């Protein structure tokens, strides 16, 4: 019996020692918290919105044939610089020329028939004045003469149409630029573009002296944009090619990036680039940096020392008490203070209210706050799982 009592007493002492050791370590860790501080001070802050986009020419045209036919010659290759009116592609003109020659022969036949009909009509008109022909014969002669004239005019119209098609069999550059893509090949049969058909794109010509960035921006940042707003453009593939530009277009309506109603809304926009580097090419990725706000002397702190309470929808910091000394203990930790934020820079954020210049803000949250936040996060996760 005594032996059991001794064993129980020993276990009790052991457990008490473990508990005391745990408590002591916990207390020492709480007391041993070291706070580091940063001062709130005036700075010039720039709020920059950065978006990615694609380089495209301002003026770019897909060249299509207006008439149907077989390609005889392709006179350019991708990368060629062309002038306005320069021939690019030639279609086989032999069929059109044969048709044109045939119509010209038909015109001569129509002219002769018209001349004969005119003479017949004039002869019958004179006989009609002498009452040698009846009215019907005279009317038939007049109609035959008018029909022959109409036929001749129709043949003339066909000539003009064929001559126009013959002229379009040579496809010329609509403006000075650079040939980007060439699909056309000799022997390729193409269908002419008309009101009912688009036709095949044979090549693309673009003016590379004027480039722009096509991108999208979210619904939060779009409100801070305006036309002609200056921007800076950088290129990952050409780091040395920095350029300036201006916002040239902002879509009046958003487009959804998903199928459900909660999908992110993006607004298309265009950035006109001023004096692009020669190595910048269409299709490259560009990063657009847009300054949306600036404050010359903003009371600000490091963005990392500002915390956010999602439940209360408020921002806060932990401020060093005014009467505290340099050595901080558990009884002199930083004090929570709600603040109002303003412009957000790359590393700092403006404090519009709640903090004065010179006050010191802790980089660390007090242990009690961390534990409370951890419990709250654990509770929220449990609710989400349920």
Image (spheres, helix red, strand yellow):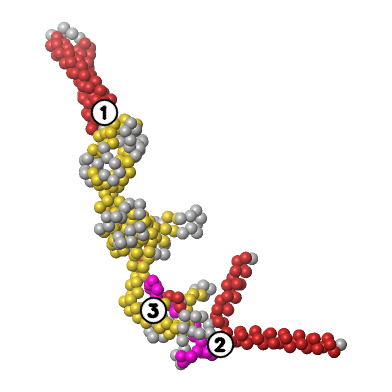
The answer to whether the residues at label 3 and label 1 have Cβ atoms under 8 Å apart is no
Rate crowding at label 3 as few (under 14), some (14 to 19) or many (20 or more) other CA atoms within 10 Å: many
Q: List the residue tagged with mark 1.
A: 93
Residue 294 lies in what quarter of the image?
bottom left
- How far apart, in angstroms, are the residues tagged by discs 3 and 2? 30 Å
Q: Nearer the viewer, residue 269 or 158?
A: 269
Local SS, label 1: loop
Local SS, label 2: helix
Q: Residue furthest front?
A: 3
Residue 187 appears left or right of 381: left
What residue is rendered at 35% in x and 52% in y?
Answer: 283
**Residue 102 at what x, y percent from top left?**
24, 20
Tell me the mark number nearer the camera, choosing from 3 and 2: 2
Residue 31 image label: 2
Where 161 falls versus 41 (above or below)? above
**Residue 325 at what x, y percent from top left?**
46, 92
User: In this picture, which residue range is highlighted in magenta?
Assistant: 325-348
Residue 300 image label: 3
Q: Nearer the viewer, residue 377 or 130?
A: 377
Q: Nearer the viewer, residue 81 or 219?
A: 81
Is 141 contained in the magenta span?
Answer: no
Where 156 falls versus 49 (above or below)? above
Is 340 contained in the magenta span?
Answer: yes
On the rendered image, what quadrant is the N terminus found in?
bottom right
Residue 28 appears left or right of 271: right
Tell me the mark number nearer the camera, choosing from 3 and 1: 1
């Amino acid at each position: 019996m005594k032996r059991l009592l001794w064993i129980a007493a020993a276990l009790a002492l052991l457990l008490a020692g473990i508990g005391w050791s745990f408590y002591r370590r916990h207390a020492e860790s709480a007391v041993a918290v070291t706070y580091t501080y940063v001062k709130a001070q005036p700075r010039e802050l720039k709020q920059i919105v950065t978006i990615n986009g694609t380089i495209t020419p301002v003026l770019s045209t897909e060249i299509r044939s207006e008439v149907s036919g077989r390609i005889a010659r392709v006179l350019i290759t991708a990368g060629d610089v062309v002038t306005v009116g320069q021939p690019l592609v030639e279609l086989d003109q032999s069929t059109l020329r044969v048709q044109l020659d045939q119509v010209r022969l038909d015109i001569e036949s129509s002219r002769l028939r018209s001349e004969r009909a005119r003479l017949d009509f004039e002869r019958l008109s004179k006989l009609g004045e002498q009452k040698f022909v009846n009215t019907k014969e005279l009317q038939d002669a007049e109609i035959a003469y008018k029909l022959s004239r109409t036929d001749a005019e129709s043949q003339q119209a066909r000539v003009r149409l064929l001559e126009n098609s013959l002229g379009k069999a040579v496809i010329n550059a609509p403006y000075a630029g650079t040939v980007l893509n060439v699909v056309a090949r000799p022997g390729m049969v193409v269908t002419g573009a008309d009101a009912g058909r688009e036709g095949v794109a044979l090549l693309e010509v673009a003016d590379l002296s004027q480039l722009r960035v096509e991108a999208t921006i979210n619904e939060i940042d779009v409100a801070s944009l305006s036309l002609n707003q200056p921007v800076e453009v950088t290129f990952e593939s050409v780091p040395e090619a920095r350029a300036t530009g201006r916002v040239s277009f902002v879509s009046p309506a958003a487009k959804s990036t998903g199928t459900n109603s909660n999908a992110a809304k993006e607004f298309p926009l265009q950035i006109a680039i001023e004096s692009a580097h020669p190595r910048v090419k269409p299709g490259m990725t560009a990063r657009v940096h847009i300054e949306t706000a600036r404050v010359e002397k903003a009371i600000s702190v490091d963005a990392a020392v500002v915390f956010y309470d999602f439940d209360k929808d408020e921002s806060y910091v932990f401020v060093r008490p005014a009467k505290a000394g340099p050595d901080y203990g558990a009884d002199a930790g930083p004090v929570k203070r709600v603040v109002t934020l303003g412009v957000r820079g790359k590393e700092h954020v403006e404090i519009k209210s709640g903090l004065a210049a010179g006050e010191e803000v802790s980089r660390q949250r007090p242990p009690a706050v961390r534990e409370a936040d951890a419990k709250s996060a654990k509770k929220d996760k449990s609710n989400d799982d349920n």
